[in-house]
Image (cartoon, rainbow, N blue to C red):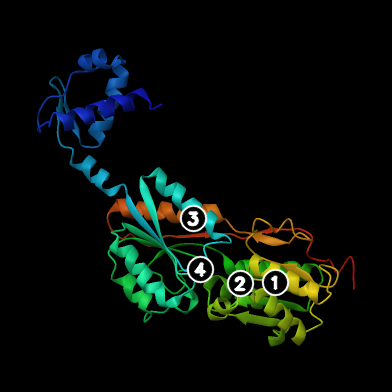
């Protein structure tokens, strides 16, 4: 239930609207409100103080309280509510339902509704899907475009965004577009920490499977490279297998395909970092077909802490992805920018990676091959 002073405040706001109060008209006295609403004098005074702070009434000592204007309140009402667009051009499964839930819950609390544009990696539909969102009169946009690591200033999406007069928040993106607020993860640190974990367990022949045209994957690859170089280990091309969106659109089992390619090129590999859990689980199947035991023959780390990674055998060591909170913060920042009424200095929220240790990594120091 609302506090009593809020009930008094809402009563007065409704009174001002229904009776079409004009500027300078005196409001009901404190005693009239106490009698009508059966509340204390302190409750009435708190409600009036709130209205005075918002510029809706003005108090004159010894004379009473007078109506000023509802313009500020009407402006706030006009700014709250409406449609928010979500452009996400990957498959609407895996970690994305939880991210969307975080976005939608936060928008709902502020009176907004979510509309989605998704093209399941059909690039010919990407721009037209965005345009359809814009044509619906959205008040703001949350966006994660496909192949986002390749988007530069001349890209059609960049040009479209530059012409929009609404706030935009990017998720898992922003490296090549500093003008947008962004919510993401410290992906380079995640790749670095994954390899450091392998190194602490005595692994040196470490491979990686990643998606080269996606910002998160590329940055995790950079972290992999930095950790290997700091350890004085060679960056062996045979242990670094990548794919792209086009390849995934043709065959979604890239983790399976790339794992077999990696082990064909470098069969002595003892550990593999997969840039996400989805391809790590596909890698599990490839390793089983190759009669390799996890972690006895080869160790595995993924990323995202996808909901079933603790159920596979062996349970997958991975990094926590703040799925719901990432969506929540993207929505919170967007709402804030909408309500300020103009583009603000871009914000950046970066979540730190947290390793979830399970049973897919062998300690070669304690248990050498």
Residue drawn at point x = 45 percent, y = 56 percent: 330
Query: What SS does tag 3 mark?
Result: helix
How far is the residue under mark 4 from the one under mark 2?
Answer: 19 Å
Is residue 91 visible to us here? yes
Disc ID at residue 220: 2
Q: Is residue 65 left or right of residue 169?
A: left
Label pair 2/1, CB-CB below 8 angstroms: yes
Relative image position of residue 307 (x, y in whole percent) = 65, 55
How far is the residue under mark 1 from the one under mark 4?
Answer: 22 Å
Mark 1 closeness class: few <14, some 14–19, many ≥20 residues within 10 Å: many
Of marks 3 and 2, which one's residue comes earlier in the chain?
3
Q: Nearer the viewer, mark 1 or mark 3?
A: 3
Query: What SS does tag 1 mark?
Result: strand
Q: Is residue 27 left or right of residue 222?
A: left
Q: Nearer the viewer, mark 4 or mark 2?
A: 4
Mark 2 closeness class: few <14, some 14–19, many ≥20 residues within 10 Å: many
Mark 4 closeness class: few <14, some 14–19, many ≥20 residues within 10 Å: some
Q: Is residue 97 left or right of residue 231?
A: left
**Residue on which the image places disc 3:** 100
């Amino acid at each position: 239930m609302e506090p009593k002073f809020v009930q008094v405040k809402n009563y007065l706001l409704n009174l001002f609207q229904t009776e079409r109060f004009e500027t300078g008209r005196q409001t009901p006295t404190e005693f009239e409100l106490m009698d009508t609403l059966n509340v204390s004098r302190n409750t009435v005074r708190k409600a009036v103080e709130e209205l005075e702070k918002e510029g809706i009434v003005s108090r004159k000592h010894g004379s009473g309280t007078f109506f000023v204007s509802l313009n500020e309140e009407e402006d706030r009402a006009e700014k709250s509510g409406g449609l928010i667009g979500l452009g996400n051009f990957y498959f609407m499964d895996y970690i994305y339902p939880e991210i969307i839930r975080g976005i939608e819950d936060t928008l709902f609390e502020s009176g907004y509704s979510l509309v989605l544009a998704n093209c399941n990696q059909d690039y010919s539909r990407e721009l037209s899907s965005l345009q359809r969102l814009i044509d619906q009169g959205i008040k703001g946009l949350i966006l994660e475009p496909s192949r986002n690591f390749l988007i530069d200033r001349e890209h059609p999406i960049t040009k479209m965004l530059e012409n929009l007069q609404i706030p935009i928040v990017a998720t898992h993106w922003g490296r090549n577009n500093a003008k947008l607020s962004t919510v993401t993860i410290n992906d380079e640190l995640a790749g670095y920490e994954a390899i450091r974990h392998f190194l602490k367990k005595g692994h040196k022949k470490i491979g990686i499977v990643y998606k080269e045209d996606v910002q998160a994957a590329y940055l995790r690859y950079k972290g992999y490279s930095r950790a290997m170089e700091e350890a004085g280990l060679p960056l062996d091309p045979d242990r670094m297998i990548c794919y792209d969106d086009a390849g995934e659109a043709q065959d979604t089992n890239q983790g399976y395909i790339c794992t077999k390619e990696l082990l064909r090129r470098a069969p002595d590999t003892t550990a593999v970092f997969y840039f996400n859990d989805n391809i790590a689980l596909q890698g599990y199947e490839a390793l089983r077909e190759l009669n390799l035991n996890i972690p006895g023959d080869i160790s595995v780390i993924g990323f995202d802490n996808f909901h079933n990674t603790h159920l596979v055998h062996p349970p997958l060591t991975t990094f926590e992805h703040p799925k719901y909170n990432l969506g929540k913060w993207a929505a919170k920042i967007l709402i804030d920018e909408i309500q300020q009424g103009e583009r603000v200095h871009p914000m950046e929220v970066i979540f730190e990676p947290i390793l979830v240790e399970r049973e897919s990594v062998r300690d070669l120091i304690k248990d050498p091959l």
